[in-house]
């Protein structure tokens, strides 16, 4: 019989890995348009998604993302702003 705690921990870790933007964003991007791409976003996960997007998008991008205090991520081309509701 499987240890319930180990089983639930493994399920949790698999779910977190499946939701990691750096591992999944590339598979969900549209075809690259002509010119620059403008990124906008809001929410707790938006800064991490913006950072992942910057790593895989090789075209020119600008943008602004608003996230909750404490959820910022380092971005070079997309501005990240932390705010409250």
Image (tube, grey):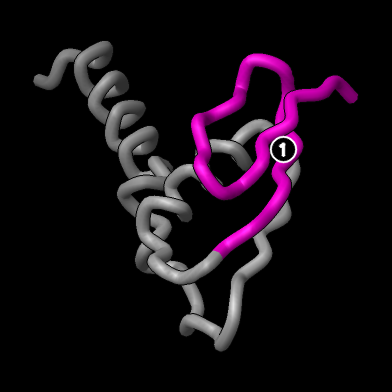
Q: How far from the left and from the top, in percent, is residue 21?
A: 42, 46
Front position in the image: 76 or 41: 76
Front position in the image: 3 or 55: 55
- Whether residue 19 sits left or right of residue 63 in the image: it is left
Is 27 drawn above or below residue 41 in the view shown? Answer: below
Assess disc 1: are there few (<14), some (14-19) or many (≥20) residues with their C-alpha within 10 Å of its C-alpha.
few
- Whether residue 80 sits left or right of residue 50 in the image: it is right
- Whether residue 66 sits left or right of residue 29 in the image: it is right
Residue extending furthest toward the bottom: 34
Report which residue position mark 1 lands on.
43
Element carrying mark 1? loop
Is 42 drawn above or below residue 68 in the view shown? Answer: below
Q: How far from the left and from the top, in percent, is residue 15?
A: 37, 37
Residue 77 among those drawn in magenta: yes
Residue extending furthest toward the left: 1
Image point 52% across, 39% down: which residue?
Answer: 75
Query: What residue span does the magenta drawing correspond to?
Result: 61-85
Image point 28% across, 19% down: which residue?
Answer: 9
Image point 50% across, 31% down: which residue?
Answer: 74
Image point 61% across, 70% down: which residue?
Answer: 37
Q: Using the rendered view, name the quadrant where residue 1 is placed.
A: top left
Q: How far from the left and from the top, in percent, is residue 46?
A: 62, 42
């Amino acid at each position: 019989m499987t240890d319930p705690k180990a089983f639930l921990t493994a399920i949790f870790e698999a779910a977190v890995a499946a939701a990691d933007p750096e591992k999944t964003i590339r598979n969900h991007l549209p075809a690259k348009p002509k010119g620059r791409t403008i990124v906008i976003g809001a929410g707790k996960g938006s800064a991490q998604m913006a950072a992942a997007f910057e790593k895989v998008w090789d075209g020119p991008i600008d943008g602004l993302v608003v996230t909750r205090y404490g959820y910022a991520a380092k971005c070079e081309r997309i501005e990240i702003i932390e705010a409250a509701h």
